[in-house]
Image (tube, helix red, strand yellow):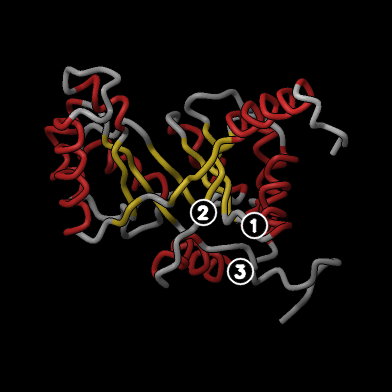
Amino acid sequence: MELYGRFGDTNNRWRRNIRQMIENGEKPVGLAMALSCPEIAEIAAIAGYDFVWIDMEHNLFNPETIQNIVRVCDCTGMAAMARITDYSQITALLDFGIVSFTFPHVRSAEQAREIVDAVRYAPVGRRGFTGGGRAQRYGLMDMDHYMKEYEEEAFVSIIIEDAEGIENYKEIFAVKGINAASVGPGDLSEALGCPGEIDNPLVIEWADKIMAYAHEHGIVDEPMIIAEDKSVLRDVFIQRLQLYRDGKLNYVY
């Protein structure tokens, strides 16, 4: 086996594999990233998080920032997962090295099929080939080896949270190539006519029904995200300010 560059073996990764962790009975713990700051991903890795969840649905990230977040994850051994709504971005994210995705607002089996086609290679999907992407070590990695590695890591999670999704969830979960699912309680409450009432019995009933069906068909829960960067910073800023005002703050860091 040949070695290239100071990082050595190009044919092996050592980052966390979300899919494998779940299959092994582990529970990956993630941080949702809303702020376009790669240092947050680095701090999350040092703190012990298994993955960052780059929320590209509700936040603004430029491609260069996403690239740097993924580089941080690869260098620290942490996984990177992206929540995206623009399917035209899938191929570029894959070729750069992201292997785990969340797709919100999945409403039909046709939409689920489009997602799987874009993310997975044949025969499950129709992902296109390139030999020189970063994920393929810029062409230094044998394509067969890369495809095997990728298929062992590829992780597709979908969110059911619309009226159409409620109507079509059985057909959606029949699409091969979906690994995980979750229910968006906020949007689901709106779809069920009780906006914002995420504890409404009707919302809970439908969420339980949808996820029970998913589990019956081998689809697991989406990995747990226990914090969001901007919310954590907000709370810490408030706490630190209160400590100062109470005369209890006598250090900076």
Looking at the rendering, in which quadrant would you find the C terminus?
top right
Instruction: Pick whichever, 179 or 206, lies toward us.
Output: 206
Residue 183 appears at what percent x and percent y?
Answer: 29, 38
* Label of residue 78 in the image: none
Looking at the rendering, in which quadrant would you find the N terminus?
bottom right
Tell me the residue at 29%/31% (across/down). 185
Tell me the residue at 58%/63% (across/down). 16
**Nearest to N terminus: mark 2 or mark 3:** 2
Of helix, strand and loop, which one carries label 2? strand
Of helix, strand and loop, which one carries label 1? loop
Residue 127 appears at what percent x and percent y?
Answer: 42, 49
Query: Label 2 belongs to which residue?
Result: 29
Query: Label 1 belongs to which residue?
Result: 48
Of helix, strand and loop, which one carries label 3? loop
**Nearest to N terminus: mark 1 or mark 2:** 2
Residue 144 appears at what percent x and percent y?
Answer: 52, 69
Name the kind of residue labelled 3 in the image.
Asp
Q: Give residue 143's quadrant in the image.
A: bottom right
Q: Are marks 1 and 2 in contact (CB under 8 Å)?
A: yes
Q: Which of label 2 and label 3 is nearer to you?
A: 2
Quick check: 112 above or below 36? below
Query: Label 3 belongs to which residue?
Result: 142
Instruction: Pick whichever, 155 or 11, lies toward us.
Output: 155
Quick check: 245 above or below 205? above
